[in-house]
Structures are given as C-alpha cells and as structure tokens.
Image (tube, helix red, strand yellow):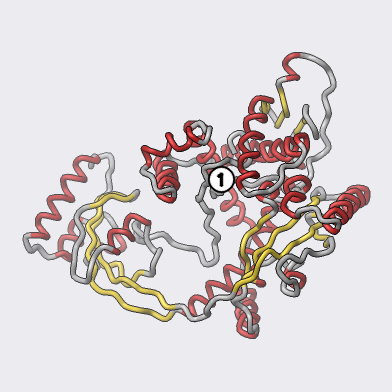
Amino acid sequence: MNPSTTRRAPGAQTVSLAVTLLALAGCAGTPPAPPPVTPAASSHVAPQVAKVQAPGTLLDNVAAVVNDGVILKSELDAQVTQTEKQILAHNTPLPATDVLQKQVLDQMVLTRLELSQAASRGVTVSDDTVNQALSRIAERNGLTLDKLPDLLKQQGIDYDQYRKTLREQIIIQNLEQQVLADNLHITQQELDDQMRADQGSGDSETQYHVAQILVATPSDPTPDDVAAARKKIDVIYDKLKSGTDFAAAAVAYSEGQKALDGGDIGWRKASELPTLFAPVVTQMKPGDFSTPMQSASGFHIVKLLDVKRSDQKVMVTQTHARHILLRTSAILSEQQAKAKIQTLYDQLKAGADFAKLATANSDDPGSAKVGGDLGWLDPGATVPQFQAAMDKLQPGEMSEPFQTQFGWHIVQVLGRRQADQTDEDRRNRAYQAIFARKSEEVIQHWLGELKDSAFIEYHIGG
C-alpha cells in the first residue's frame, strides 16, 4: 500500500474529530469526535457496587473508585460544569444537579475503564496526531492553531486539559476500532444479501435522523433486572406522553452512549439502523417517538427527528498522480530529508525525468518501481495534506516539496477524469449499512462486559 494513501475499509465508520469549543462531554477528561470529542459514554447500568458510608476526609474527596484508581470529586465537579455548558449550547433543559452528576460520573467511570484497556493493549496516540486534530478543530473555527488556546480561554476551558481530553478520546476511538476489528465480521453472503435488499428498495437512499433513550440491562440480566428496567422505561415513556422534552429526558435518564447529546445518534439509512429500530422508524413521521422496545442491551424509546433523501447516482473526480517520497530514518534526519527532496525538486525543474528519479530515490516501494505512479485516486484516498497539494495542480503541473506524516513529497498530476462509481458506491454503502448496524451491537455488548468485570465503587450517587 502506498504510504501516502489511507486504506478505507469499506463501511468502516470514521470517528469524527469535530470538537465543539463550548464543552467537553464525558470523562476527566472526556469524543473526539469530537462534538466535543466525546468518547463513548456508558450504555449499560453499573454493576452492583458498594456504597461507602464511613466518614473521613479522604472519602469525602473521592467520587468513585475504578479498579486501582479513583475519580476525585473536584474532577467530577469540573466535568459537570463543562457538560452543563454543552447541554445549554444545544438549547436542552438541564436535568436536576444530582441526575446530571450521576450521568457524568458514569461516563467518567467508563472512560477510565476504556483508557485502562487501551493501555493494556498498547494503544497510544502520537503528539503529531493530536496536533493534526487540534489544527483541524482550529481551522473549522476559522483560526490558526496558535490562536486556539486564546479562544478556549475565553470559553473558560484550560488548553492543556482540552489537549489531554482530545488525546484520550482519540485513544478510545482507536481502541473501539480494534474491538470492532476483532469482533465484527461481515461475510460475502451478508454483503450480497444487503445489496439485493438495497436494490429492491425504492427508497434505499432515505436517511433518518434518530435519537434514542436507553435503559440498559446487565450483559447477563436476572428477571429482576429486566423488571426494574421495564418499570423505569415505562415511567420515562409516560413522561414523554405528558410533554417532557425528549432530549431533556435523554440527558436525565438515558444510559446510551449519546445520552448527554440528547440521545442523538445521527443520520442513518434504514439499513444502517439497529434491526430493532428499522421497521419502526421507517413508519414514523418527524417528531414521533416509539413505544418502549426491548433488545439484548435493555429497553429503548426511539424518536425520529427528521428525514431526507439524496440522489443515487455517484460521480467523482479522480486524479492520476505520481510522487516521490523521502522518509526520515536513523540514517536520514529531518533536515537531510528536506535538503535531499529540495535537490530532487531542483533537478526536476531543470528537466530531469520524474519517473527515473522516483524509481531511484522514492521510499514508497509500491509506486517507486513504476516511476512513482499512484494510479487513479478517488477523493479522500490520500491523507489530507497530500490531497490538498494535488487539488492545487492542473494536469502536467508539479508541486513544490511538502511534508505529511509519511515524510517529504513531490507530487505531479498527470490527469483528471469524471468517474461513475454508482456500482462501487452501492457495494460500499451495503458494507457500511451492515457495519453500522452490527458495530453498535458489538460495542454495546463489549462495554457492558467491561463494566461487569470491573471493580467500581461509587462514593457519590450510584
């Protein structure tokens, strides 16, 4: 695989790094995905825990014990404050303080557990990755990276803590991708069946904006667990029928991953919705909410927020490009690589043959043997810096040296064309639908097992 390109597993959901600057949801830090960048919030009820009643200064300062670590009351208070800002930014009514405190603490507990899992698996995130994420956040807010700390300060957010939280959220997203890679498998038969189902559906492109409230049950619930959850969801349903705002109820009562976002799980095609939801949601009108439904994770109420359709024909502009890559290494320092790529660039400007220089010098083994040729590239097939460099060039033009996470490049655009990728897009969409449907179930189950196997002791709430 060419180092400048990013292989997109069909249907793999990219974890968003769009972070709002008003608040950080979830953990002491804590997704990325950053609305804030919220790592996953707990979607399961907490396992049985011991409530500590003994007095003492130390216990008064501890909100929860999670395996060998603690969450301090001061950490919880700071996170509650940030979460309040996030909720208010969405114009959602705040729940009672003790209710919000419990929701936030549950998220913080789960984040601690996931970070511990990540550490045991060796999942880390480099400073460069965090810096790139911060740069994208700054750019989306019309800023340069050096101006981001000032804006955060105006919002009452400490930059160092914000950076730490972002790192944690990216780690958690990478961890969950590993979990999905280990546990989510899609067969060719499933893919073929989904494509046939999509082809036979006249509205396969309809998308549904959906929110949910989840009252979770343990991974191996007793009849009493199920009965208690059923009673709680029925109370919530009665509140909704009496006019309680759905988003406010989700913030206050839901145990789903998006509880503090008002239960909003985003836009989904019918084929991407959990199997339980699809037949219900597709019959709803915007504003409708369902009666309680039971799944292996617990009881759900789902609300349809909006519906939209899109054109099925997919045309993309492909770019034919070739490049020369120089990687830094133990024998080629950053400065040496930069100097060498500049020398190669000067030779090309003087008329040297691009293909010969690429074959002799490029550190991309896949393309070097064919004169640096990368073939026809779809939009988004390369890392953002490489895509941006290509987009500035007309066919026949060559870039000046530029740097990506892989090293120093020179790229030349050989041609562009419009390509009809409707068939390939159908296959990708079928994969994405299956992936979206199954990934939610896999992660919900894994999170439940993670909490059930942990030692968790609440000193507040619980």
The residue at 74%/62% (across/down) is: 303
Residue 37 vertical placement versus 190 (above, below): above
The residue at 37%/56% (across/down) is: 384
Residue 286 vertical placement versus 226 (above, below): below
Q: Nearer the viewer, residue 453 or 365?
A: 453
Image-quadrant location for residue 75: top right
Whether residue 156 sits left or right of residue 133 in the image: it is right
Q: Position of residue 123 (x, y in %)?
A: 53, 42
Whether residue 195 sits left or right of residue 3 in the image: it is right
Q: Position of residue 363 (x, y in %)?
A: 26, 54
Whether residue 239 sits left or right of residue 350 in the image: it is right
Residue 57 vertical placement versus 117 (above, below): above
Q: Secondary structure at mark 1?
A: loop
Image-quadrant location for residue 199: bottom right
Q: Residues within 10 Å of mark 1 (few under 14, many from 20)?
A: many
Number of marks in the rendered image = 1
Residue corresponding to mark 1: 36
Outermost residue to the left: 350
Q: Position of residue 320 (x, y in %)?
A: 29, 71
Quadrant, the N terminus = bottom left
Q: Position of residue 219 (x, y in %)?
A: 79, 50
Residue 337 vertical placement versus 54 (above, below): below
Q: Nearer the viewer, residue 287 or 197?
A: 287
Image-quadrant location for residue 351: bottom left
Outermost residue to the top: 57
Quadrant, the C terminus = top right
Could you tell me the amino acid type at mark 1?
Pro
